[in-house]
C-alpha cells in the first residue's frame, strides 16, 4: 500500500446520517467531516479484512489508530458523546488506553492525541504547534458562551449534559499550562461573548482559574463553582442540573483592587526610575522616558513628518532596546513600513527607486537581517479593515503571546472614520485604549489627524499645533498621558527652514514640567534621517546646525 492516500469519493455517513460528508480514501479508510461527527473507518486489507495502519500518518504525526467509540459507563458517558467529540478507546504498545483527538479547528484534521492510561497517567502524541483545545473544532463560529474545563472527561460531561448544543472545550496540557493555552487561543475565544472557566475545585484548579481569568478583559471571563470536585463527579451523582446552574451562575472574575499602605509600602519606597527611553535623549530628559500602562498622542499637519518620526522611534526600539514592537499602519502597506524601518537603520531610502535613493539590494538584505536579529516586529495587515474591536483583540493577543510592550498605531482617526458617529466612536476608543494599556502594562503610541485651525497659519505652513486641533480633542486630551505636536513650514522660501521640524510637548501628565517645551529636528534627505538641532535663526544664512554624527547617535 502507498504511504500516501487520496480522496476518491463522498458517501453517506452511517453514524450521523449526512448525505455526503463521509470521504472515502484510496487506501480504503474513511472519515466523516460532518459537524460534531468524526466517524472513522480504518483501511482494511482486501485478503484478511484486517485494519491497516497508514505508515505515512504514523511516521509524520506519531499517532495511534483512533480505535472504537464506546460508552464510558463508569463515567456515565454515552457512545454518541464520545463519537461526536472524537474520544475513543484504543491500544498503545499493547495497553488499553483512552484517546482524545486534538483536531485542527478549521479543517477537523487530527493533529495530536492525548492518551490516557488506566493509572491516569497521560501522554501527548503528535504536533499541535498552535495548541488548540480538545473539541475546539466543533465550534468554529463562536457564540454567546464557551465553557472551558480542566480535563477531557469533564468537557465530555458538559457536552452531554447540554445535549451537544452549547460550546465546551478542554485544556489539554494540564492545569499549569492552562493560562498559556488560553493565551494562544485568544483570537478564537474572542468570538464568544462570555468565557466560563469550569476547572476542578481543588487548590490547583482554583489557582489556575484565577491565573487564567486574568488574561481577559475584566468582567468578560467568569469562574464556575461546583459543590463537588468536577463536573463528572456531579454527573455520576445524578446532579446534572447543578452543572447547568453552575454555568449560568458563574461569577465574573475581578481582582481585589483594595490595598493598604502596608501592602504598598515596598512599592512606595522604591526609587523612581526612567521609563523606556525615546530615540532622542532630549525628549527622554524632558519626560523621564516612557512608562508602561500609558498612551502617547502625536499630531501634525499632512506631510509634516509625523510618520517619519514614528519610524525613527520604531527602529530605535528594535535595534537599541532589543524590544519586540507591533505596528498598526492603517494607511501604509506592511512591506513599505518594513522598507522604511530598514532604511532608518541603514541610512538609505529603500522605499524609493534604487537610482534615486542610491542603494543596492545587498544593502537592503543586510539591513533586514540586522533588524530580524535584533528584535521582532509584528505588522498588522489590515486588508482595508480598520475595526477597533479587531485591533484591540490583536493587541491583547500580541501582548500575552508574544510579549510585545511597545505598540504603534497610525492613525487613530481611521478607526473612527467608518462609524456613523465619529466623535462618539473616538471617545469610546480612547477610553478603551487607555484601559487596555493599563491592564496589559503596555505603551501605545498613536497618531491623530488635526482639524484645520480657524485662525492663524495652516499646520502645513508651520502653524502652531494645539490640543484643541486634535480631531476628537476632548477625549484624546483626557485619556492621553502625553501629547506632542509636530510643526514644519513646508512653504517657506528658505529651503533650509522648510526642513526644520518643531516638536512641541502639549501635555505632560507625569510632572507637568515638559508642557510647552520644544525641541527641533533637521532632515538629511540623502540618508532619510532626522537629526537634532537647535532652534533655527530665521535671519541667519545657515539657520540651524547639524551636529556631527547626529544621524546615527540616537
Image (tube, rainbow, N blue to C red):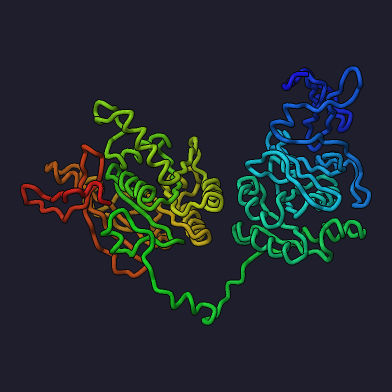
Horizontal relation, residue 262 to residue 550: left or right: right
- Residue 60 visible (yes or no): yes
Question: Which quarter of the picture shows residue 332?
Answer: top left
| 126 vs 438: above or below | above
Closer to the camera in the image, 123 or 112:
123
**Percent x, y for residue 405?**
46, 54
- Residue 462 visible (yes or no): no
Horizontal relation, residue 100 to residue 328: left or right: right
Closer to the camera in the image, 138 or 301:
138
Q: Which residue is drawn at 26% across and 59% down?
A: 282
Numbered marks: total? 0
Horizontal relation, residue 429 to residue 25: left or right: left
**Percent x, y for residue 371?**
39, 42
- In the picture, which quadrant includes the N terminus? top right
Closer to the camera in the image, 221 or 214:
214
**Percent x, y for residue 495?**
14, 41
Q: Residue at x 23, y 53 (%)?
A: 502
Closer to the camera in the image, 236 or 544:
236
Q: Which residue is drawn at 49% across and 62% down?
A: 438
Q: Residue at x 29, y 39 (%)?
A: 346
Amino acid at each position: 500500500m502507498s504511504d500516501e492516500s487520496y480522496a476518491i469519493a463522498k458517501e453517506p455517513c452511517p453514524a450521523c446520517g449526512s448525505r455526503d460528508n463521509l470521504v472515502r480514501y484510496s487506501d480504503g479508510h474513511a472519515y466523516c467531516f460532518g459537524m460534531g461527527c468524526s466517524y472513522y473507518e480504518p483501511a482494511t486489507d482486501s485478503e484478511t479484512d484486517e485494519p491497516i495502519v497508514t505508515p505515512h500518518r504514523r511516521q509524520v504525526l506519531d499517532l495511534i489508530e483512533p480505535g472504537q467509540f464506546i460508552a464510558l459507563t463508569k463515567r456515565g458517558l454515552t457512545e454518541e458523546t464520545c463519537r461526536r467529540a472524537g474520544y475513543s478507546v484504543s491500544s498503545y504498545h499493547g495497553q488499553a488506553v483512552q484517546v482524545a483527538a486534538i483536531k485542527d479547528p478549521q479543517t477537523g484534521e487530527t493533529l495530536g492525541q492525548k492518551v490516557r492510561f488506566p493509572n491516569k497517567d497521560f501522554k501527548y502524541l503528535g504536533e499541535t504547534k498552535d495548541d488548540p483545545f480538545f473539541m475546539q473544532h466543533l465550534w468554529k463560529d463562536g457564540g454567546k458562551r464557551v465553557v472551558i474545563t480542566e480535563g477531557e472527561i469533564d468537557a465530555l460531561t458538559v457536552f452531554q449534559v447540554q445535549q451537544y448544543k452549547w460550546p465546551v472545550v478542554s485544556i489539554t496540557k494540564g492545569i499549569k499550562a492552562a493560562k498559556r493555552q488560553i493565551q494562544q487561543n485568544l483570537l478564537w475565544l474572542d468570538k464568544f461573548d462570555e468565557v466560563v472557566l469550569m476547572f476542578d475545585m481543588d487548590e490547583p484548579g482554583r489557582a489556575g482559574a484565577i491565573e487564567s481569568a486574568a488574561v481577559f478583559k475584566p468582567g468578560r471571563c467568569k469562574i464556575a463553582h461546583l459543590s463537588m470536585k468536577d463536573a463528572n463527579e456531579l454527573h455520576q451523582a445524578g446532579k446534572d442540573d447543578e452543572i447547568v446552574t453552575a454555568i449560568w451562575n458563574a461569577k465574573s472574575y475581578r481582582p481585589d483592587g483594595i490595598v493598604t499602605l502596608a501592602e504598598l509600602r515596598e512599592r512606595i519606597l522604591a526609587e523612581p526610575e526612567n521609563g523606556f527611553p525615546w530615540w532622542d535623549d532630549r525628549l527622554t530628559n524632558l519626560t523621564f522616558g516612557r512608562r508602561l500602562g500609558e498612551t502617547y498622542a502625536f499630531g501634525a499637519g499632512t506631510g509634516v513628518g509625523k510618520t517619519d518620526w514614528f519610524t525613527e522611534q520604531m527602529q530605535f526600539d528594535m535595534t537599541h532596546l532589543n524590544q519586540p514592537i507591533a505596528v498598526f499602519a492603517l494607511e501604509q502597506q506592511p512591506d513599505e513600513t518594513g522598507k522604511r524601518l530598514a532604511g532608518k537603520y541603514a541610512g538609505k531610502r529603500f522605499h524609493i527607486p534604487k537610482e534615486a535613493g542610491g542603494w543596492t539590494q545587498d544593502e537592503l538584505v543586510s539591513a533586514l537581517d540586522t533588524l530580524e536579529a535584533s528584535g521582532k516586529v509584528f505588522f498588522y495587515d489590515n486588508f482595508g479593515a480598520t475595526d477597533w474591536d479587531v485591533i484591540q483583540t490583536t493587541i491583547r493577543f500580541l501582548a500575552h503571546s508574544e510579549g510585545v510592550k511597545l505598540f504603534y498605531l497610525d492613525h487613530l482617526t481611521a478607526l473612527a472614520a467608518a462609524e456613523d458617529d465619529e466623535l462618539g466612536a473616538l471617545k469610546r476608543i480612547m477610553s478603551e485604549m487607555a484601559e487596555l494599556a493599563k491592564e496589559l502594562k503596555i505603551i501605545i503610541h498613536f497618531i491623530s489627524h488635526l482639524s484645520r485651525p480657524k485662525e492663524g497659519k495652516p499646520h502645513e505652513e508651520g502653524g502652531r499645533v494645539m490640543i484643541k486641533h486634535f480631531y476628537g480633542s476632548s477625549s484624546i486630551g483626557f485619556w492621553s498621558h502625553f501629547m506632542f505636536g509636530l510643526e514644519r513650514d513646508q512653504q517657506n522660501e528658505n529651503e533650509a527652514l522648510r526642513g526644520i521640524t518643531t516638536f512641541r510637548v502639549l501635555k505632560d501628565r507625569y510632572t507637568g514640567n515638559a508642557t510647552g517645551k520644544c525641541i527641533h529636528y533637521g532632515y538629511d534627505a540623502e540618508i532619510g534621517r532626522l537629526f537634532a538641532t537647535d532652534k533655527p535663526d530665521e535671519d541667519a544664512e545657515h539657520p540651524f546646525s547639524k551636529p556631527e554624527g547626529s544621524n546615527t547617535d540616537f
